[in-house]
């Protein structure tokens, strides 16, 4: 079986890539910023809003909470400014040997053993080669096959399971995600058995 998918990046897709990477592999930074914000707001409550220090703590807390997602927005902005004239594109052909990536830089093969992790959201699959390098495969652009088929194929070839954006810290969402994933896998397997 061979799967083909492609992506032509836009400003929105670059932001999405940066956001997925940040929310999946930079959670400590995100939660540290949130912790500082919450601590500062609690500090303002205990110090009192009438004091200068209380107001300063409130301002710091609000600023920290409002800027939690600043790092991925800034990273995306820098990439878009640098690549504005020639936004990146890629075509992915997945076969038994590996993932053949074609872009403006040529064609190369990514072996399934090089895959660090697999992440998905409603619209895309993300194939991470390391915490800073990934490929985005839009589900809607799959030319041959279905998103569920490609997902099962990647899981089988890499020996890894797809996880949600943000990882294990989203406990409630994870529970529903893994129940849905098991149902989809069962449905896809029963569909393949019928062929």
Image (cartoon, rainbow, N blue to C red):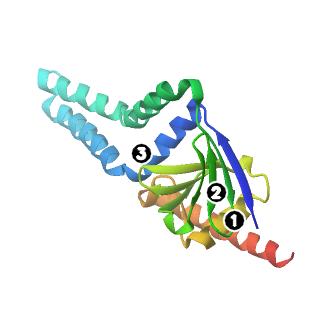
Disc 1 element: loop
Q: Is residue 24 above or below residue 41?
A: below
Residue identified by numbered label 2 = 100
At label 2, counting other C-alpha atoms closer than 10 Å, the crowd grade (few under 14, some 14-19, many 20 or more) is some
**Outermost residue toward the right in this view:** 195
Residue identified by numbered label 3 = 22
Mark 1 or 2 closer to N-term?
A: 1
Q: Is residue 30 above or below residue 65?
A: below
**Front in this rendered view, residue 106 or 143:** 106
Indicate the quadrant where residue 155 lies: bottom right
Mark 1 or 3 closer to N-term?
A: 3
Residue identified by numbered label 1 = 95
Disc 2 element: strand
At label 3, counting other C-alpha atoms closer than 10 Å, the crowd grade (few under 14, some 14-19, many 20 or more) is many
Q: Which residue appears at 38% of the width and 32% of the height?
A: 70
Q: Which residue appears at 62% of the width and 43% of the height?
A: 103
Distance between mark 1 and mark 2 Cα atoms: 8 Å
Distance between mark 3 and mark 2 Cα atoms: 26 Å
The reply to whether the C-beta atoms of the residues labelled 1 and 2 are less than 8 Å apart is yes
Distance between mark 1 and mark 3 Cα atoms: 29 Å
The reply to whether the C-beta atoms of the residues labelled 1 and 3 are less than 8 Å apart is no
Q: Which residue appears at 41% of the width and 54% of the height?
A: 131
Q: Position of residue 20 (x, y in %)?
A: 49, 46
Disc 3 element: helix
Q: Position of residue 84 (x, y in %)?
A: 54, 25
Q: Is residue 182 left or right of residue 119?
A: right
């Amino acid at each position: 079986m061979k799967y083909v998918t492609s992506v032509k990046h836009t400003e929105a897709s670059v932001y999405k890539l940066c956001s997925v990477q940040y929310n999946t592999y930079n959670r400590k930074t995100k939660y540290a910023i949130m912790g500082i914000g919450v601590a500062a707001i609690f500090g303002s409550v205990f110090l009192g809003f009438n004091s200068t220090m209380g107001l300063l703590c409130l301002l710091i807390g609000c600023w920290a909470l409002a800027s939690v997602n600043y790092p991925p927005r800034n990273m995306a902005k820098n990439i878009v400014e640098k690549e504005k004239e020639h936004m990146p594109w890629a075509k992915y052909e997945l076969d038994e040997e590996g993932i053949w990536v074609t872009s403006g830089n040529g064609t190369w093969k990514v072996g399934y053993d090089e895959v660090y992790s697999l992440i998905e959201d409603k619209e895309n699959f993300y194939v991470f080669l390391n915490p800073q390098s990934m490929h985005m495969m839009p589900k809607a652009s799959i030319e041959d096959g279905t998103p569920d088929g490609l997902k099962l194929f990647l899981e089988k070839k890499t020996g890894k399971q797809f996880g949600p954006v943000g990882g294990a810290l989203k406990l409630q969402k994870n529970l529903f995600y893994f129940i849905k994933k098991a149902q989809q896998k069962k449905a896809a397997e029963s569909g393949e058995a019928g062929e």
